[in-house]
Image (cartoon, rainbow, N blue to C red):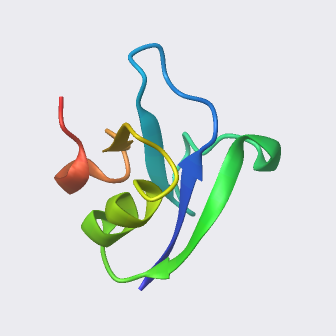
Amino acid sequence: MAEFYVEINAQANGDHLVHNAACSLLPAKDGIRYLGSIASCASAVKKAAESFRQVNGCPQCATSCHIA
């Protein structure tokens, strides 16, 4: 299990990126929403999609869930 967060503000392409807690690209606390302690980035992306229409995994810390 890992702690996951989603960016509140979308990227230029509309993506809200999902990060794990150890990611060096994780924005400041006021720019993220805690998703919880989740087994995989795929599950974290699904959880984030409950709040945001366009979600993607971080290209650095959630590579298996990142769609280029």
Q: In which quarter of the image is residue 44?
A: bottom left
Q: Is residue 60 above or below residue 47?
A: above
Which of the pair 65/46 is nearer the observer?
Answer: 46
Q: Residue visible at 47% across and 13% down?
A: 12
| Residue 4 in the image, given as x and y percentages of width and height | 51, 66
Q: Residue at x 43, y 23 (%)?
A: 14
Q: Residue 42 at what x, y percent from top left?
A: 26, 65
Name the outermost residue toward the right.
30
Q: Is residue 31 left or right of residue 39?
A: right
The residue shown at (31%, 38%) is 59
Task: Specify whether 38 is left or right of 43.
Answer: right
Q: Within the image, what quadrant is residue 25 found in?
A: top right
Coordinates of residue 46 in the picture (x, y in percent): 33, 63
| Residue 2 in the figure: left or right of residue 33 | left
Query: Eyeballing the image, is 7 above or below 62?
Result: above
| Figure quadrant of the N terminus | bottom left
Percent from the top left, x then y, of residue 40?
30, 74
Establish if 18 lies above or below 22: above
Determine whether, in the image, residue 50 is placed left or right of residue 8: left
Residue 27 lies in quadrant: top right
